[in-house]
Image (cartoon, rainbow, N blue to C red):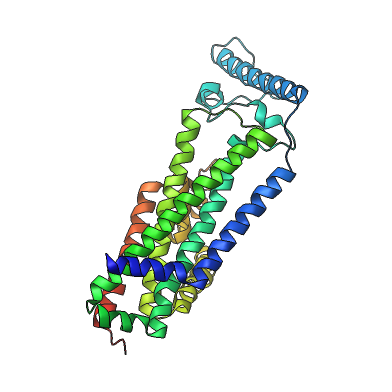
Amino acid sequence: MNLIRAEAERLAARRFVQLMVALLALAFVVTAGTTIVGSHSPSPAELAAAQQQAADDRRSLELEYDRCLARQRGEHPRDNDDYLPSDCSEVDPARMDRLPVAADYLSGVFTFTRQAEPLLFFLVAFLVLFGFLVGASAIGADLNSGGVVNLLLWRPRRMTVLGTKLGTLLGAVLALSLLASAAYLVTFWLIAQLAGHPGPTNPAFWSGLGAIWGRGLVLVLLATAIGFAVATMGRHTSAALGAVAGYLVVWELGGRIVLEIVGAARPDQLMLTSYVWAWLTGQVELWDDSACTSLLSGYCDGLYTLTWRPALAVLLSLTGGLTLAAFALFRRRDLT
């Protein structure tokens, strides 16, 4: 317990951590302030007009579906100017992800249900960066300055010391992420109530938002552990930064170009960013250019889907492998 408390105090006292927390707060204030300035409470007339427009569009969707069904029954002649799919389920309003609502037609109004997800993605991206940098600096600075050696003189158990550092770091980042994201969402909910429009909320909306929130927190912890592991192996914070920069430039940019030139099948499956996005959103649709190269004519569907399950497996394997390698190297390394 003394070791955990000591690590928590050391982490809180780091100027870099304090700077990152200040930048997080600044980004939060700027985003909230910009939202307030660019929004206003809709008047009753604006709401009525938006509700009427949404009702008209929903009615149009229903009429299109009815025409499609009538055509299938032979009651509606085919019109070249009136496109209707062969499968009427494609235009069935009941099967659509969402129907038009009044919030879709409010101009200059912050609507929570429309913008909560993009705002949450922005927060998760910042927290991922925060976790990675703090995780790398927490161990990189100690290894570079000799702080770990001094700590081992007091507690001469390498695995215990390193494990406590990682555990304390993950706990602190998780606590900060929970507080920051909760305050973030509550603030924008209040902005929508006072200077915008909440929009239609239901259990499906909150469960979807909660799923993104939970997956985002997992991603933040994984990024923190990766930063910690790479900096441990490189014995410096800059090692983690260099590894990420090198990966992005060499593989995500250069490797992607080479794979496209040679016509490799599904190159996006070889990119870590694809799995990150698939995990965060639940699934992502990707396009395979090589799937249609052998066809001379006709329709070709090169779309394929990457879901969260393989994405999580890849992310956990990467994080676990790097962490195990870091602990194994730390156990045998000469720290003097």
Residue 122 at least partly seen: yes
Does residue 287 lie above or below 154 as drawn?
A: above
216, 301: nearer the viewer: 216
Locate residue 168 relative to residue 198 in the image: left or right: left
Does residue 137 lie above or below 79 as drawn?
A: below
Residue 263 at least partly seen: no
Numbered-mark total:
0
Quarter placement of the N terminus: bottom left
Residue drawn 52% across and 43% down?
300
327, 32: nearer the viewer: 32
**Where, by quadrant of the figure, is residue 11 drawn?**
bottom left
| Residue lying at the far top of the rendered structure | 75
Task: Locate residue 336, reporting x and y percent.
Answer: 32, 90
Task: Locate residue 264, reporting x and y percent.
Answer: 46, 61
| Residue lying at the far bottom of the rendered structure | 336
Task: Locate residue 120, reporting x and y percent.
Answer: 54, 47
Locate residue 279 relative to residue 37 in the image: left or right: left
Does residue 17 lie above or below 96 as drawn?
A: below
Residue drawn 44% across and 57% down?
220
Does residue 331 lie above or below 320 as drawn?
A: below
Residue drawn 64% across and 53% down?
29
Task: Locate residue 328, reporting x and y percent.
Answer: 25, 75
84, 43: nearer the viewer: 43
**Where, by quadrant of the figure, is residue 172 drawn?**
bottom left
